[in-house]
Image (tube, rainbow, N blue to C red):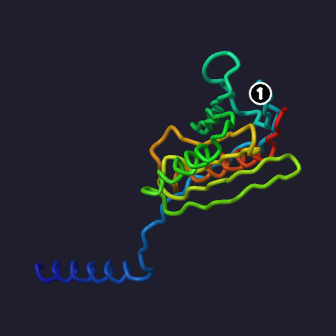
Amino acid sequence: MKQRRIYSIFIFAVILLLGACGKETLPKPKAMLKLSYPKPSYIDLLSYCGYSFEVNKQAIVKPMGKQGSCWYNIEYPTLKATMYISYFKVNNNLDSLLRDAQNLTQEHVVKADEILQEPYDDRKNKVYGMFYEVRGDAASQSQFYATDSVHHFISGSVYFKARPNYDSILPAANYMKGDMRKLVETIRWNE
C-alpha cells in the first residue's frame, strides 16, 4: 500500500512537471500610460509692453508683478506645468541678455541627456532667437529667447510641478514644446 502511494505521487509529479513544460514564461512588459491632450487652439495675447503673441485657450495667463507688468506665467493646470515669460527692454545690453538666456539653458547640462538648439529667424516680423529642447531629467524641457535686436527681448521656459522624470512627462513636454513654438512663431512687436 505504501509503495502504491509513493508510485502515485511519483506519477503525479511527473505529469505535473511535463504539463508545466511548454511555453517559456516571460515577464509582462511594463504598462505605458497613454496620455492625450485636446487639440490646441490659440488666441492673441496683447501686452502693454510692446509685444504680442498667441497663447493656448486652455492655459491660464497670469500677469506677474504690478499692473502693466511685462512678465507672464502661463499655467496649464491639467498638465501641472507653467511657462514663465520674461520681458526686458534692450538698452545697450543685448549681449548680456543673450548670455543670461543661454546660461539659463546650460544650467540644465548636469541632468540633461541632450540639448538641441534651433535658431529662429523671422526677418519679415523682425523676430530672431533660439529655441532649446532639453532631453533628459532636467527641470525644464523647453526654453527660448526672442528679440528684435534693438528694443525688445523675451525669454521663456517651461517647468512642471513634478519630479523631472523625462519618460513620464514626455507627452506633456511635447505638448508644451508645441505651445512654446507657437508662441515664438507668433511674437509681434508693437512699436
Please state which of residues 87 and 184 is positioned toward the viewer in this rendering.
Answer: 87
Helix, strand or loop for disc 1: loop
The residue nearer to you, when weighing 145 against 148, is 148
Residue at far top of view: 67
User: Farthest front residue?
Assistant: 92
Near-viewer residue (154 or 62): 154
Q: What residue is drawn where x is 49% and y is 62%?
A: 113
Circle 1 is placed at which residue position?
47
| Residue 20 x %, y % | 37, 78
The amino acid on which the numbered mark 1 sits, given as a three-letter code, is: Ser
- Residue 130 position, x and y percent, is 68, 53
Circle 1 crowding by C-alpha within 10 Å: few under 14, some 14–19, many from 20: some
Task: Examine the rendered structure and indicate whether residue 57 appears above or below residue 67.
Answer: below
Image quadrant holding the N terminus, namely: bottom left
Rendered location of residue 141, percent (x, y): 57, 51
Quarter assignment of residue 76: top right
- Of residues 36 and 87, which is closer to you in this image? 87
Residue that sits furthest to the right in the current view: 124
Q: Residue at x 71, y 49 (%)?
A: 178
State the residue at coordinates (78%, 33%): 51
Number of marks:
1
Q: Is residue 12 left or right of residue 95?
A: left
Examine the rendered structure and indicate whether residue 98 appears above or below residue 26: above
Q: Which of the 4 image quadrants contains residue 64?
A: top right
In which quadrant will I find the C terminus? top right
**Residue 74, x across and y down, in percent:** 66, 32
Judged from this view, the residue extending furthest toward the left is 2
Q: Is residue 42 left or right of residue 75?
A: right
Residue under the point 71% across and 51% down: 129
